[in-house]
Amino acid sequence: MTCFSRTTLARQVLFGALVASGLTLVTTQAQAATITIACGDGGSADFCPELARQWAQETGHEVAVVTTPQSGTETLSLYQQLLGSKSSDIDVLMVDTVWPGLLAAHLIDLADYLPEDASEGFFPAMIDNNTVDDRLLALPWYSDAGLLYYRRDLLEKYDHDVPETWEQLTEIAREIQNAEREAGNERMHGFVFQGRAYEGLTTNALEWIASYGGGTIVDDDGNITVNNPQAAEALTLAASWVGDIAPRGVRNYMEEEARGLFQSGNAVFMRNWPYAWALGQADGTAIQGKFGVAPLPHGSAGESVATLGGWSWAVSRYSKNPDLAAELVAYLTAEAQQKAHAIRFGMNPTRVTLYQDKEVLEVQPFIGELYDTLVSGVPRPANVTGEHYTRVSNAFFNRVHDVLSGDLTAEQALGQLERELNRISRRGW
């Protein structure tokens, strides 16, 4: 028996997408109903297939596991293709933190299928991020937030504390970079981050601007707020880093390029996601035991801000079994499953209590250090801008990149960005 009949157009769309994307299906023995779940890319941290099979064994239902592309952009495109055709071939989808608003029209309200307390116990900001027009579209599975990585040994060597402001980071990074170069390491840089014109730059620049009190590009009421003096101050400082404490090539860095330079021992500070911790502490790395993490710096009159990232579980409104699909979502995000995910894979839970769980902290002590950062995390304006978010983010990171490249001043870029966003929102978000 196969799990997918190809007699309908919708199923033909899925089959074609699976073949084109190199996706694979794994199924269990048939029972009462079949729930198809789109897991991750099958990497070492993909706990989804095992948990889905576990749920099937406990409930007597069948699961079909779809392995999605490595690229989030390709996965979103696949989802939009299937959901746009109202295909029922995928019931449960793993969605990026900025996708609920983009896919809202195609997702069920989980509150209609789950108990009233289903959203309790999660970080409130994550539930808020996944709630669009008072509809709970997804439950958070694991989280990410921007962090400052620093070379503990170098700060001790030059008698510096971890910087609390961006200005302090700039000065300390420059001092240590120059001293290390004079001592013979000409490849040393003060600070690396994600400066390429892509979504990663949106997360970085949002942290800079929000930490200066410059807002979040578009506020919760849909007002465009990005063109202000605080935002200009933040971007002007960031532009000054390029060619000074940051390599000129940082304008083409994504997460892995920044991590590679920091992990090689050639950067004092790095902005990145929590995943880089375990890789930097691996045996044989140049920085093993020599670095730490801290909240990101802030502007002179602002507060530390970390952009929220992570993944959640949602249910397609075209599912033929939305009640069972919602049940699977609740199972995947339950405390027991998140605890196992944290212990076995080092993934950051979305449930508050697990950040004080002794068993979790014994195996993954780094997770406990993320609590305050996640509590105060800031979401990107994806929900308020809805289906327009991709255009909003593209406009934002392109104008920020112009500032980093020296093609526009911060004031010029923000004025141009405001006009672009006004055009995008002309008929409302």
Image (spheres, rainbow, N blue to C red):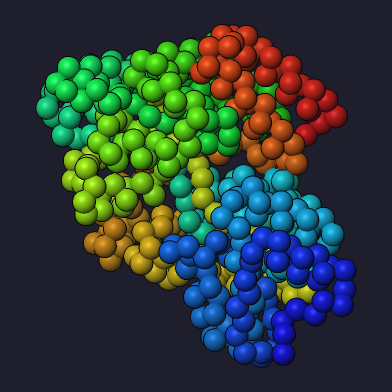
Q: Which residue is drawn at the image coordinates 72% and 85% (left, top)?
A: 2
Residue 327 occupies quadrant = bottom right
Residue 367 in the figure: left or right of residue 421:
left
Residue 427 occupies quadrant = top right
Q: Quadrant of the N terminus?
A: bottom right
Count of numbered labels shown in the rendering = 0
Residue 428 occupies quadrant = top right
Q: Position of residue 322 (x, y in %)?
A: 73, 71
Is residue 225 depicted above or below 321 in this figure? above
Residue 319 in the figure: left or right of residue 111:
right
Q: Which residue is drawn at the image coordinates 28% and 66% (left, top)?
A: 359
Residue 94 in the figure: left or right of residue 222:
left
Q: Position of residue 366 (x, y in %)?
A: 29, 51
Q: Quadrant of the C terminus?
A: top right
Compare residues 417 and 283 and report the one nearer the observer.
283
Is residue 409 depicted above or below 106 in this figure? above
Q: Which residue is drawn at the image coordinates 29% and 47% (left, top)?
A: 280
Whether residue 276 appears in this view of the structure is yes
Residue 244 in the figure: left or right of residue 84:
left
Compare residues 429 and 148 and report the one nearer the observer.
148
Whether residue 163 appears in this view of the structure is no
Q: Position of residue 372 (x, y in %)?
A: 37, 42
Q: Position of residue 234 (x, y in %)?
A: 47, 17
Is residue 320 depicted above or below 205 in this figure? below
Q: Which residue is drawn at the image coordinates 53% and 17% (left, top)?
A: 405
